[in-house]
């Protein structure tokens, strides 16, 4: 009987540290394998680079559109752009035309 009591006391005294160790292992596993863990970091970095490239393309398109809007301002319309738009709308532009800039 004395051995059983000692064994029970040993198991009860080891229960707390065992539970703490299991919790520690669980959280350590979540740090590595979780949705915000170390392994997901590479995927987030790749998504960030993709989003930054898309942002750069969108900003370039926005700058180009802002430039065209400025060129079509009713107070000071760019004659070359208006000529191009009018010829394209009327269908008098040819596919083999070459535009030579004067600058």
Image (cartoon, rainbow, N blue to C red):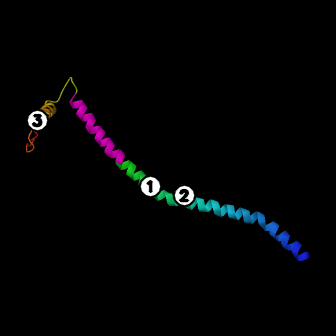
In what quadrant of the picture does the C terminus appear?
Answer: top left
Left or right of 9? Residue 38 is: left
- Asked which secondary structure carries label 2, the reply is loop
Q: Which residue is tagged 2?
A: 37
The residue carrying pointer 1 sits among few (fewer than 14), some (14 to 19) or many (20 or more) residues within 10 Å by Cα, namely few
Q: What is the C-alpha distance between the residues marked 2 and 3?
A: 59 Å
Where residue 30 appears, x then y in whole percent?
A: 59, 59
Left or right of 38? Residue 95 is: left
The residue carrying pointer 3 sits among few (fewer than 14), some (14 to 19) or many (20 or more) residues within 10 Å by Cα, namely few
**Magenta span dominant secondary structure:** helix
Residue at the top extreme, as displayed? 75
Q: Which region shows up in magenta?
A: 54-72
Q: Relative to 57, does residue 3 appear above or below in the rendering?
A: below
Q: Quadrant of residue 1?
A: bottom right
Where residue 55 appears, x then y in whole percent?
A: 36, 45
Question: Does the magenta run of residues contain 61?
Answer: yes
Of badges 2 and 3, the one in the foreground is 3
Q: What is the C-alpha distance between the residues marked 2 and 1?
A: 13 Å
Q: Relative to 77, does residue 10 appear above or below in the rendering?
A: below
Of badges 1 and 3, the one in the foreground is 3
Earlier residue among tags 2 and 3: 2
Earlier residue among tags 2 and 1: 2
Please state which of residues 78 and 12 is positioned toward the viewer in this rendering. Answer: 12
Q: Quadrant of residue 13?
A: bottom right
- Asked which secondary structure carries label 1, the reply is helix
Residue at the image point whose x is 87% and y is 74% from the top: 4
Q: Which residue is tagged 3?
A: 91
The circle drawn on residue 45 is 1
């Amino acid at each position: 009987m004395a051995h059983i009591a000692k064994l029970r006391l040993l198991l009860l005294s080891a229960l707390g540290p065992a539970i703490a160790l299991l919790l520690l292992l669980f959280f350590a596993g979540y740090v590595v394998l979780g949705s915000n863990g170390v392994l997901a970091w590479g995927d987030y970095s790749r998504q960030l680079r993709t989003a930054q490239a898309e942002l750069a393309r969108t900003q370039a398109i926005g700058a180009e559109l802002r430039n065209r809007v400025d060129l079509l301002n009713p107070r000071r319309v760019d004659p070359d752009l208006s000529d191009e738009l009018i010829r394209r709308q009327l269908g008098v532009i040819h596919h083999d035309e070459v535009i030579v800039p004067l600058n």
